[in-house]
Image: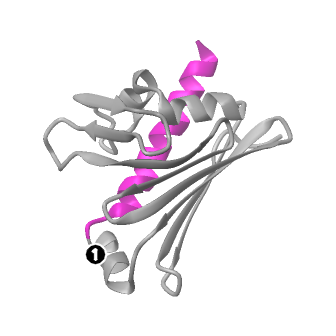
């Protein structure tokens, strides 16, 4: 049996990449929807666990997104580059390239999230600001959100 949330975070200083992994007992479509629908994103995106104040998603290549929290940090905003439901999202935000890859595996979904920074200095800034820790907490919120949705 696959655990509801296998976790891992890797920081690669040579490729300026932070990688997060989770495994969910949920189909890829449910995980993809949680990443792309404001009704879901509003509930899990903020690392503090507080619902977002607002969430805007234009889900198309070149479409913008903006997630606004309860005023404790700047909005998270960017542009989608690739949308392949239910397997892949690619986007640009905060000067970095992000990828969400979803793979069905033994009745579960394996998720890999990568953040590719532009340089060693950019990665160092992200780490200094706690992007690695904050993103890990945010993904833990996604785990809880999907677990609650399955239990309902």
The location of residue 96, given as percent across then percent down, is 39, 65
Q: What residue appears at the point 56 percent right and 29 percent down from the top-left corner?
A: 33
Mark 1 is surrounded, within 10 Å at the Cα level, by few (under 14), some (14 to 19) or many (20 or more) other residues, namely few
Q: How many marks?
A: 1
Q: Quadrant of the N terminus?
A: top right
For disc 1, the marked residue is 125
Q: What residue appears at the point 53 percent right and 82 percent down from the top-left corner?
A: 15
Closer to the camera in the image, 5 or 15: 15
Q: What residue appears at the point 25 percent right and 28 percent down from the top-left corner?
A: 54
Where is residue 51, by image quadrant?
top left
**14 magenta-colored:** no
Q: Main secondary structure of the magenta part?
A: helix
Q: Is residue 40 left or right of residue 113?
A: left
Residue placed farthest to the front in the image? 62
Look at the image and tell me whether residue 51 can be seen: no
Q: What residue appears at the point 33 percent right and 65 percent down from the top-left corner?
A: 95
Q: Quadrant of the C terminus?
A: top right
Q: Is residue 54 left or right of residue 87?
A: left
Badge 1 element: helix
Q: Is residue 28 above or below residue 100?
A: above
Where is residue 92, by image quadrant?
bottom left
Residue placed farthest to the left in the image? 71
The location of residue 97, given as percent across then percent down, is 45, 63
Q: Is residue 79 above or below residue 151?
A: below
Residue placed farthest to the top in the image? 152
Give the magenta part as a residue range. 129-152
* Colour convention of the picture: one colour
The location of residue 35, given as percent across then percent down, is 50, 36
Where is residue 109, by image quadrant?
top right
């Amino acid at each position: 049996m696959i655990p509801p949330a296998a976790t891992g975070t890797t920081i690669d200083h040579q490729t300026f990449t932070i990688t997060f992994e989770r495994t969910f007992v949920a189909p890829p479509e449910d995980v993809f929807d949680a990443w792309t629908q404001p009704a879901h994103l509003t509930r899990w995106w903020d690392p503090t666990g507080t619902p977002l104040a607002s969430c805007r998603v234009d889900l198309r290549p070149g479409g913008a997104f903006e997630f606004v929290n309860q005023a404790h940090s700047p909005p998270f905003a960017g542009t989608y580059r690739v949308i392949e439901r239910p397997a892949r999202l690619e986007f640009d935000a905060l000067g970095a390239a992000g990828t969400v890859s979803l793979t069905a595996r033994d009745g579960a979904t394996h998720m890999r999230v990568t953040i590719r920074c532009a340089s060693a200095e950019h990665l160092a800034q992200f780490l200094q600001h706690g992007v690695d820790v904050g993103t890990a907490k945010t993904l833990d919120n996604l785990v809880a959100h999907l677990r609650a949705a399955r239990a309902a």
